[in-house]
Structure formats: C-alpha cells, structure tokens
C-alpha cells in the first residue's frame, strides 16, 4: 500500500436537513385579518367606554334641566255655550272628556258638576237609565235627579263637587273649574254654585 492511500480521508454521506412538520391537531397560525385583545386591554377599553358613557348621559341630563317639563292642561275657565242650548232635566256630557265637567239644567237654572270621583279621581259615567253617576274604578255611585252628585254607594267619602258657574258678557255660560263648592261644607247654597235664570 502506498502512503497516499493510507492518509486519504474517508468518504461520508451528505447530511440531510431535518424538516419539522406542524402538528396535525392545530393548523398553522395565520394572524392576517384577526384581532386579539389581552385581558388588560379589554378592561381598559371597558373602563373608557364606561367613562364616556357617564359623560354622555350627564351632558344629556344637564341639557334636560334647561328645558322644564310643561304640562299642557285645558284652561280652568271655559265657555259652555248659551243657556238655550240645554234642555231642562238633561245632564250634558259635552264637556266631560275635555274639561271633566257635567252641565245640568233644571227648572230653576244651571249648575256645573265636577266629573272627578271623590274617592281616587277617576271619571264616573252618567247612567241615564239608572239615574245615577257610576265610577268604573271602584264602584262609587252618586245620585242623579233631583239630588245630583250625592254619594250613596261604594267607597266615595263625599259627594261630587260643584263648580263656579256664571254668565259671561256675551251671554254664554262661563265655568271656572278652580272654584269648587263642597256639599259637606254647605257651599252648594253659594250663589256662584248655581246659575239662576230669571
């Protein structure tokens, strides 16, 4: 053997690169188009949203106080037509819905009866066939002719109220709902609680 052969290096196989395959149970991460948030980021965002929500509602509340709530009610005084428009013995319900008032004419004149139950403020109905006013809420009953408005059944503690009734300058009946006359105080005899036609 020659010396050259002894010193020759042995021939080795080329090394192969190791390629790792992704795990089969999880697809490779693809962060394109997704948005992730940490717990700290979530609570931070929730805190800011709560803060701005509070500022917004406080501002709305402050602006609301600058514009007071106005309750539009019908006027307390109103004209109810001419005396010749009413029939003797009739209970007129013409103004019951708008003003909560019945206008009653008898042989001597007129009076205005408040259509507000003295129990809890409901609006009674006039039942002409039974000659009484009947409250639909709790069953209070008030007499018809000739004792219009006197309570006789149910929980109502007192009779219906009469209202001020006069003649206006133009000859129409004028009713003032702010001035009331109570039976239990013997105010139904007050001249303003009855419009006498002479």
Image (cartoon, rainbow, N blue to C red):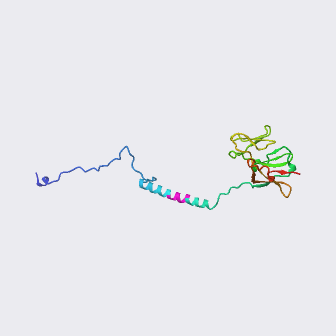
Give above or below for 68 relative to 157. Answer: below
Looking at this view, is 45 or 79 the one in front? 79
- Outermost residue toward the front in this view: 186
Outermost residue on the bottom side: it is 66
Type of secondary structure dominating the magenta stretch: helix
- Judging depth in this view, the residue of 81 and 143 nearest the camera is 143
Residue 65 position by quadrant: bottom right
Residue 59 visible in the shown view: yes
Write down the region rendered in magenta: 51-57
Q: Is residue 36 magenta?
A: no
Count of number-bearing discs = 0
Residue 104 relative to residue 122: left or right: right
State the residue at coordinates (58%, 61%): 62
Q: Quadrant of residue 150?
A: top right
The percent position of residue 21, horizontal first and vertical second, equals 34, 47
Residue 88 percent coordinates (x, y): 86, 45
Judge whether residue 55 is colored magenta. yes
């Amino acid at each position: 053997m020659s010396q050259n052969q002894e010193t020759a290096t042995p021939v080795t196989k080329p090394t192969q690169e190791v390629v790792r395959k992704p795990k089969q149970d999880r697809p490779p991460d693809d962060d394109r188009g997704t948005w992730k948030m940490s717990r700290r980021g979530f609570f931070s965002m929730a805190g800011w949203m709560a803060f701005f929500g509070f500022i917004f509602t406080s501002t709305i509340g402050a602006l609301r106080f600058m514009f007071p709530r106005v309750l539009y009610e019908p006027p307390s005084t109103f004209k109810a037509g001419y005396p010749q428009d009413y029939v003797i013995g009739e209970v007129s319900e013409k103004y019951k819905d708008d003003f909560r008032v019945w206008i009653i004419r008898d042989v001597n004149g007129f009076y205005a009866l408040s259509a507000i139950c003295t129990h809890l403020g409901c609006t009674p109905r006039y039942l002409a066939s039974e000659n009484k006013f009947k409250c639909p809420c709790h069953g209070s009953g008030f007499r018809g002719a000739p004792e219009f408005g006197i309570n006789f059944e149910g929980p109502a503690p007192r009779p219906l109220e009469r209202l001020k009734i006069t003649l206006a300058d133009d000859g129409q009946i004028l009713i003032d709902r702010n001035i009331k006359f109570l039976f239990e105080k013997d105010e139904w005899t007050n001249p303003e609680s009855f419009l006498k036609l002479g």
